[in-house]
């Protein structure tokens, strides 16, 4: 998997460093400034995916390999604001991570208004042609609409929900998100901290790795499945459920049963 995010605090004992590889970007994959927002964000996302079994917080796919492509620099961000990237920066990071061998991308970057949307759209298309599944946080601006990220037909946009399956108030919604996206847990999610063993966070950045982790688990069970098959198994619901700006909930068990039915009985 390829999280395009901040660097990761690889020195934490519950994060298996041997399962984290670096795709060179704005800096190294390992944090050097643990107080910065970029490091917090990258470590939290990685923790949802990769914390060791029996660790401080349960991870979705603790044996997976992460190809970490840092896109946020380790510089201070005022007033607790989250780091962001330009469309051109994100487009370049997508291409580099795909070429490094990632077969699923986790994107939790806020886009700053800038030129370069065409470059980003081309990068998304390049990943799609390579059969790479792209999971994108829908954003936390409480708006209804779309971006170049959420509009792409191959992308799975992710909305955050609470424990009752209701969308969190800050989650962005929209027609493209409702047609192709999913909802996943994104409130009070416990993950690996940088300075402390655990930290709680939320929003669509917390929700996206649940979907990316589900992709990884499904592909580990059905390694011969095509990317389109895995994506369809996760996102296919009745057309009536897709006539809303609000996407359906992630249902990994249902996706597993669909792929199992399509693959037939295993030989082992």
Image (tube, grey):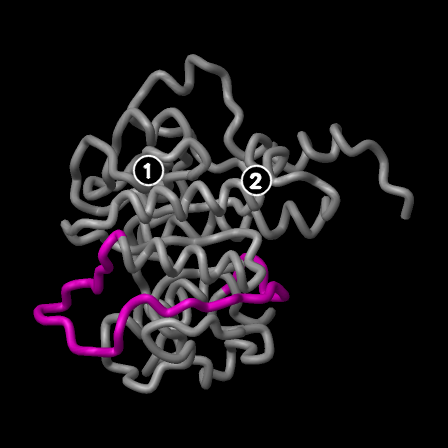
Q: Position of residue 224 (x, y in %)?
A: 74, 44
Task: Identify the residue at image location x=46%, y=80%.
Answer: 10
Q: Main secondary structure of the magenta part?
A: loop
Which one is in front, 4 or 144?
4
Residue for point 33% across, 31% down: 177
Give the answer, above or below, for where 54 lies relative to 116. Answer: below
**Residue 228 picture location, percent across and down:** 59, 34
Judged left or right of residue 104, residue 171 is left
Residue 161 shows in the view? no
Q: Position of residue 157 (x, y in %)?
A: 37, 39
Q: Which residue is mark 2?
A: 252
Above or below: residue 93 compared with residue 220: below
Q: Is residue 27 magenta?
A: no
Depth order, front residue of 171/135: 135
Residue 207 placement (x, y as % from top left): 38, 49
Disc 2 crowd, CA 10 A, few/some/many (<14, 14-19, 20+): some
Check residue 150 in the rendering and tell me which mark sits there, or answer none. Answer: 1
Does residue 48 show up?
A: yes
Residues in magenta, as a range = 58-87
Q: Nearer the viewer, residue 141 or 110?
A: 110
Specify the quadrant of the image occupied by residue 165.
Answer: top left
């Amino acid at each position: 998997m390829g999280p395009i995010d901040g660097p990761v605090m690889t020195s934490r004992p519950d994060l298996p460093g041997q399962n984290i590889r670096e795709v060179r970007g704005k800096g190294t994959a390992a944090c050097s400034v643990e107080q910065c927002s970029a490091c917090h964000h990258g470590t939290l996302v990685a923790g949802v995916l990769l914390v060791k079994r029996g660790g401080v917080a349960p991870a979705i796919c603790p044996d997976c390999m992460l190809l970490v492509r840092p896109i946020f620099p380790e510089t201070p961000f005022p007033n607790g604001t989250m780091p962001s990237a330009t469309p051109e920066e994100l487009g370049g990071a997508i291409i580099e991570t795909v070429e490094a061998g990632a077969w699923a991308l986790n994107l939790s970057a806020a886009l700053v208004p800038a030129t370069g949307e065409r470059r980003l759209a081309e990068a998304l298309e390049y990943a799609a042609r390579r059969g790479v599944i792209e999971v994108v946080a829908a954003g936390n601006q409480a708006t209804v609409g779309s971006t170049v990220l959420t509009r792409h037909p191959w992308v799975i946009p992710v909305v955050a929900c609470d424990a009752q399956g209701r969308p969190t108030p800050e989650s962005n919604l929209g027609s493209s998100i409702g047609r192709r996206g999913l909802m996943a847990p994104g409130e009070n999610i416990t993950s690996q901290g940088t300075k402390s063993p655990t930290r709680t966070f939320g929003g669509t950045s917390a929700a996206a790795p649940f979907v990316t982790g589900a992709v990884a688990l499904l592909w580990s069970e059905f390694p011969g499945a095509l990317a389109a098959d895995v994506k369809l198994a996760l996102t296919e619901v009745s057309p009536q459920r897709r006539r809303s700006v609000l996407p359906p909930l992630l249902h990994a068990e249902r996706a597993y049963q669909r792929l199992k039915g399509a693959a037939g009985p295993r030989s082992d």
